[in-house]
Each structure stands twice: as structure tokens, then as C-alpha cells.
Image (cartoon, rainbow, N blue to C red):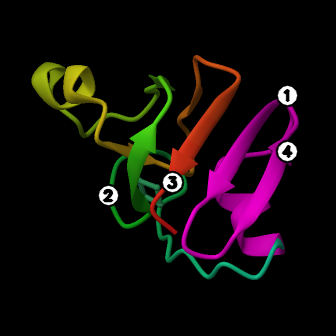
Amino acid sequence: TFEVECVRSGLTLAVPPERSVLAVLNDAGLAVPCSCEQGVCGTCEVAVLEGEVDHRDSILSASERAANATMMTCVSRAASPRLVLDL
Ligand code: FES
């Protein structure tokens, strides 16, 4: 389990191992658009302000991953206890 803090909406949410960041955000009323839910389309991309992302998508390049500025919320997770998102 890790936390995602959504700075613009003032919400901090727990993401358990069996759920995606996208599902947790949508359940909290943050309507992040999605399509493939498999990390291949890029629709669910969200900007990351703080924290390390465990990138599991098939879209971002190695340099984009290293930049750690964005994540695909349908499949990617946190490699740090907390992510801060621009939501
Ligand atoms: Fe397609 Fe997340 S919904 S990459």
C-alpha cells in the first residue's frame, strides 16, 4: 500500500496492492479519463510532482521514465511510500 496525494483537490488516498491508482482516483470522485487500462494508450496520464514512480506502462521512453514527471495511472505504481499528483 502506498499513498497518493492529490494537491489540487486536497485528497490523500491509499492505494492497496490489488487496486490501480486509476481505480482509487476514480472512486474518490477524481474523473481521470482512461481507455485501454493496460498501459498502452496514454489516456490516463497524470503529472507527478513528487515521489518515485514504478513505471509499468508500455508508452514512456527511458528518458521520460527517468524524468519521473508523469505516470500512467492504470498500471504504474509507486516506488516510494507516497506520490504527489497534479490532480
Ligand atoms: Fe491506457 Fe492507462 S488507460 S494507458
- The answer to whether the residue labelled 1 contacts the one labelled 2, judged by CB atoms less than 8 Å apart, is no
Q: Nearer the viewer, residue 21 or 86?
A: 86
Which of the marked residues, 3 or 1, is nearer the chain's N terminus? 1
Q: Is residue 6 magenta?
A: yes
Q: Can you identify the residue that label 2 sits on?
A: 42
Q: Secondary structure at mark 3?
A: strand
Q: Quadrant of residue 47?
A: bottom left
Segment colored magenta:
1-27
Q: Is residue 66 found left or right of 78 in the rendered image?
A: left
Number of marks in picture: 4
Q: Secondary structure at mark 1?
A: loop
- Give the number of the disc on residue 14: 4
Mark closer to the observer (3, 1): 3
- CA–CA distance in space, label 4 to label 1: 7 Å
Label 4 crowd bin: few (<14), some (14–19), many (20+), radius 10 Å = some
Dividing the image into four equal quarters, which quarter contains ligand 1? bottom left
Q: Can you identify the residue that label 1 sits on?
A: 1
Query: Which residue is pictured at 32% across the width and 58% down the height?
Result: 41
Which of the marked residues, 4 or 1, is nearer the chain's N terminus? 1
- Give the number of the disc on residue 79: none
Label 3 crowd bin: few (<14), some (14–19), many (20+), radius 10 Å = many
Residue 68 image offset from top left, x and y in percent: 31, 31
Q: Can you identify the residue that label 3 sits on?
A: 85
